[in-house]
Amino acid sequence: MTSEPEELAARVRTVAREAGASAVAIAAARRDGVTETRLREAFARGDFATWHYDDAYAARATSPQSILPGARSVICVAVAYATRARSRALPLQGRVSNYAWSHDYHRRVRGILEPVAAALDAFAGEPATRIVCDTTPFAERAFAARAGLGWIGKHTNLIAPKIGSFVFLGEIVTTLLLTPDAPLTKSCGSCRRCVDVCPTGALRGDATIDARRCISDLTQRTDAVPISLRPLMGTWVWGCDLCQEACPPTQRAGFAADAAFAPQDDARAQPDLPALLRLRSSRFKREFRATAMGWRGAAVLRRNAAVALGNTLDRAAVPVLAQALEDDPHPLVRGHAAWALGRIGSPAAVAALRERHAREGDAQVRDEIAAALGAMETFTGAQALELGRASSAV
Ligand code: SF4
C-alpha cells in the first residue's frame, strides 16, 4: 500500500470491494457527540426496550478511541443481503426477516473486513486496526452516515444509494490516516411509507423507533410478549421487514446480493408454523443454531410460532396449539399457545383451554388461559348484544 492518505483510502476501497463489500466509505475517527446525546435521550425514553444500555455505553459507542486508542479513521462497509423476493406464504407458514435467511452473517462480513485489516496492518508494520461487526458497542449507522455510505432513513436503517437498506454493516477502526469521504446530502424527504406501514406504530417519523413496539424486537425478547401487541405481529416469527419492503430506495435497488445470503431452502424464509411450534433441542441445534435466529434458543421460536399461529385465525392450527398447551415444557410457550387458542376461538380451542385450566400447574399459564377464555366471553357477549340490537331493529 502507498502512504498518502488519499491513495491509502483508494486502495482500501479496492481491497474491500474485491473481498465482497457492496459499498465502502471512510469517516474521520472523531467522537460523535450528537449521536451520543441522541442515544442518551433514546435510553431515557426507554426506546431500547429490554436492552439495558446506559450513558457509559453511549459514550463508548460513539468514540472510536474507546475501541482503538489512537484511532484516526473508520472504514465503513455495506454488504447487500437481499437475494430474492419473498414467496407468497402458504397456509400456516410464518415469515422470517430477510437478514436471517442464511447462515449467521457475522462470519461473512468479518471475512470481507479481514483482508482489508490485514493489508493495513502489513502497511503499518504493526497492528493498526480493529474490526467491528455488531458484537462491539459502536454506533455503526451514525459513522456510516458520516462517511457518506448512505443516510439514516425514517425506519432507522441506513439506506445506501442504489443498494437500499437490506445491508449488513461492518467497520474497521484504524490508527492510520485515510482521506475521509463527505456525508451525503440525500434524505427521505416527505416520504413516510415505512411509518405508515408499521402495524404497531413503532416508528415516530424522525428516524427514531420505540423498540418496545417493534415487531422485530418483540420476536427477540425472552419474556412474554405484551398481549395488546400480539395480534399486530402477524405471522412474523423472527424479525420483521415491513418497513424496509415498503421503502422506495430499497425497492428500486432490487436483488443483487452475494449468493451466500440466499436461503438454504424455502422453509428457512417461510417456516412451517406447526413444525416450528414442535421444535425441540436437537433439531434446533441442527437447523437454527448457526443462523441469526439461533441466539435466543428454541423456546423463543416456539413462543413466536404460537403467536403467529393464533394470528392466522386458522382452525387447522388448533390441534398443534392444544398439544403445545398440554405438553410444551416451557410455561412461556404454553401461555402463548393459550392466547393463540383464544384468538382462534373455535369450539375445539375453547374446550382445550377449559380442559387444561383445571390441570395447569403454572400460575402465569393459568392466568393466560383465564385471560383467553375471558376475552372470548367478552367478545361473545358484545356480539350477542350487537345481534340483539340488530334483531330488535328488524
Ligand atoms: Fe425513508 Fe420512505 Fe424509506 Fe421510510 S420508506 S426510510 S421514509 S425512504
Image (cartoon, rainbow, N blue to C red):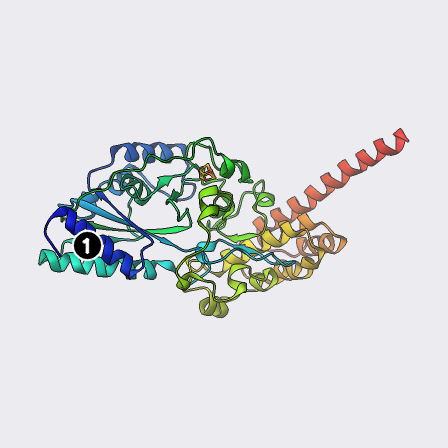
Q: Which residue is mark 1?
A: 11
Residue found at x 8% / y 58%: 125
How many discs appear?
A: 1
Can you give x and y, in whole percent of width and height, for residue 7 in the image?
Answer: 15, 50
Q: Residue furthest top?
A: 393
Placement of the C terminus among the 4 image quadrants? top right
In this rendering, position of residue 259 left or right of residue 322: left
Q: Secondary structure at mark 1?
A: helix
**Residue type at the position of mark 1:** Arg
Q: List x then y, in percent, for residue 387.
A: 83, 36
Q: Nearer the viewer, residue 21 or 367?
A: 21
Q: Is residue 279 above or below residue 147?
A: below
Q: Is residue 192 left or right of residue 386?
A: left
- Which image quarter is the N terminus in? bottom left
Whole-percent x, y for residue 196 in the image: 54, 36
**Mark 1: C-beta under 8 Å from nearest atom of ligand 1:** no
